[in-house]
Amino acid sequence: MSIDMMNAKASTYFDLMAQIEQLQAEAEAIKDALKGQMMERETEELEGPGWRATWHNTNNSRFDSKRFKTDHADLYSAYTIKTTGTRFTLNQISV
């Protein structure tokens, strides 16, 4: 692949990422509007043809690994698995 083709691909990538960001913002605004309607109607569920929205409190439990590491460093080390991977990044820079 030539440098011109790579430049074109990178440019297309950044254009697509900008579109994705804009679409995500629009989708979030729609979700917020639906949540607003749910609050106004004092309901946890809205439904229409082919869709249903629910919005309610949930309870979750998660393991506090930072605190466990602080309180039990020896056990944390014994049960920690190190992994190696690769990471690709493509960042836009000012020219």
Image: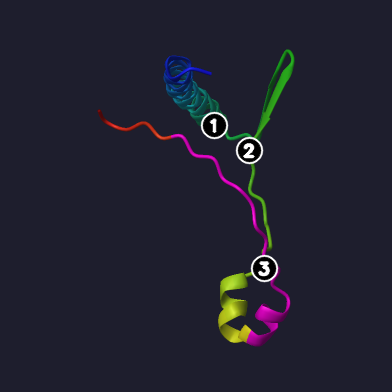
Give me the C-alpha separation between circle 3 and circle 1.
Answer: 30 Å
In the rendered structure, does residue 60 fall within the stretch colored magenta? no
Disc 2 or disc 3, which is closer to the eye? 3
Quadrant of the rendered image containing residue 53: top right
Q: Residues within 10 Å of mark 1 (few under 14, many from 20)?
A: some
Quadrant of the rendered image containing residue 79: bottom right
| Residue highlighted by disc 1 | 35
Q: x, y percentage for residue 7?
A: 42, 19
Q: Amino acid at mark 1?
A: Lys
Give me the C-alpha separation between circle 2 and circle 3.
Answer: 25 Å
Mark 2 / mark 3, whichever is N-terminal:
2
| Residue highlighted by disc 2 | 55
Q: Looking at the picture, does residue 90 appear above or below residue 27?
A: below
| Residue highlighted by disc 3 | 63
Give me the C-alpha separation between circle 1 and circle 2.
Answer: 7 Å
In the rendered structure, does residue 78 fall within the stretch colored magenta? yes
Q: Residue at x 48, y 18 (%)?
A: 9
**Do the CB atoms of the residues marked 1 and 2 lie less than 8 Å apart?**
yes
Q: x, y percentage for residue 23?
A: 49, 21
Seen in the image, is 11 located left or right of residue 53? left
**Which residues are the magenta region?**
74-90
Mark 3 / mark 1, whichever is N-terminal:
1
Disc 3 or disc 1, which is closer to the eye? 3
Q: x, y percentage for residue 36?
A: 50, 30
Closer to us: 66 or 95: 95
Q: x, y percentage for residue 46?
A: 66, 26
Magenta stretch, main secondary structure class? loop
Closer to us: 22 or 83: 83
Q: Residue at x 42, y 15 (%)?
A: 4
Badge 1 element: helix
Q: Residue at x 25, y 28 (%)?
A: 95
